[in-house]
Image (cartoon, rainbow, N blue to C red):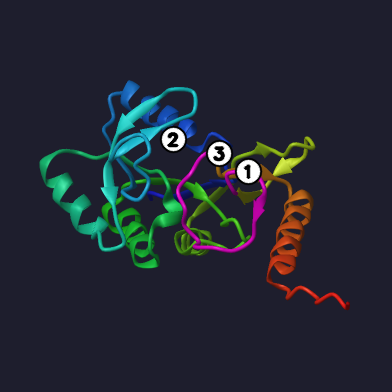
């Protein structure tokens, strides 16, 4: 029976590179793949999966309203699909992840998803939470913190490189906006950001004459 896989990591762990290598391996053996990525992230062009080492591939795009199950069913009427690979899987909705489970169970097509586990505040993304709950196989890809430990967290920084502790969950960016850190150093930077924000919001004490 086909399985649903979730490969998760912090930023800069090479998730897109691993996906593109898996896609190459399938196609090298004469098997046909179907690639997806989030329409939200179009830094390299709409529907383009791009790795930091220069590998790229064109993919279908999904949005929160996309009916992934229907599109896959329409595609397999035209050609055989041996594997589905999904980049930026954290942006999937829970309903879409349930659809992926159906595709595995009922259509017998293995699905490999790749994405972040948590956001810049340490909270799970909707798609990641659903995949952690429903995927058959969970695989953690390793990134390295500046201290040499395994990086598991994603710190958002501003244009001056200072840590950011508040804001919208989704803000597309690369190394200019995010740093992969171990939990210890992530928590230290978040406390730094929260302290700076508190100092900015506290009223200034009036001076006595």
Give whichever of discs 1 and 2 has the lower sequence position.
Answer: 2
Closest to the camera, between mark 1 and mark 3, is: 1
Where does residue 66 sit, x and y in percent of width and height?
Answer: 25, 59
Work out whether 191 lies above or below 158: below
Kindly report which numbered mark, 1 or 2, lies closer to the viewer in this rendering: 1
Q: Position of residue 138 (x, y in %)?
A: 55, 51
| Snapshot quadrant of residue 45 | top left
Query: For the magenta stretch, what is the residue range?
Result: 158-174
Label 1 and label 2: CA atoms lie apart by 32 Å
Q: Please report the residue visible at 36 percent of the width from the left and 27 percent of the height from the top.
A: 56
For label 3, the residue is 176
Q: Is residue 196 left or right of residue 100?
A: right
Q: Look at discs 3 and 2 and give the one toward the viewer.
A: 3
| Disc 1 to disc 3: CB gap under 8 Å | no
Q: Is residue 150 above or below residue 117?
A: above
Who comes first in sequence, dot 1 or dot 3?
A: 1
Q: How far from the left and from the top, in percent, is residue 16?
A: 46, 35
184 vs 94, nearest the viewer: 184
| Residue beneath disc 2 | 19
Q: CA gap, disc 1 to disc 3?
A: 9 Å
Q: In terms of sequence position, does the residue under pointer 3 or pointer 2 come before the other?
A: 2
Query: For the residue labelled by badge 1, is the local secondary structure a helix, a strand or a loop?
Result: loop
Tell me the quarter of the image containing the C terminus.
Answer: bottom right
Main secondary structure of the magenta stretch: loop
Q: Secondary structure beneath disc 3?
A: loop
Marks 2 and 1: in contact by CB < 8 Å? no
Identified at 38% across, 50% down, the residue is 1
Q: In the drawing, does residue 75 fall left or right of residue 159?
A: left
Residue 54 magenta-highlighted: no
């Amino acid at each position: 029976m086909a399985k649903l896989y979730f490969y998760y990591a912090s930023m800069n762990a090479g998730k897109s590179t691993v996906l593109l290598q898996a896609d190459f391996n399938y196609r090298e053996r004469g098997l046909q793949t179907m690639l997806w990525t989030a329409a939200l992230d179009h830094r390299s062009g709409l529907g383009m999966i791009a790795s930091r080492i220069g590998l790229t591939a064109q993919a279908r795009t999904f949005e929160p309203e996309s009916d992934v199950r229907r599109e896959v069913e329409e595609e397999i009427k035209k050609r055989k699909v041996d594997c589905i690979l999904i980049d930026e899987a954290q942006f999937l909705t829970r309903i879409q992840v349930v659809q992926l489970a159906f595709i595995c169970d009922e259509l017998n097509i293995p699905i490999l998803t790749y994405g972040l586990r948590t956001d810049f505040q340490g909270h799970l993304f909707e798609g990641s939470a659903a995949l952690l709950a429903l995927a058959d196989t969970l695989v953690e890809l390793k990134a390295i913190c500046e201290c040499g430990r395994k990086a598991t967290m994603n710190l958002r920084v501003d244009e001056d490189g200072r840590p950011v502790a508040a804001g919208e969950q989704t803000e597309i960016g690369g190394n200019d906006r995010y740093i992969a850190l171990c939990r210890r150093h992530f928590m230290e930077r978040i406390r730094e950001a929260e302290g700076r924000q508190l100092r900015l919001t506290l009223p200034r004490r009036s001076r006595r004459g």
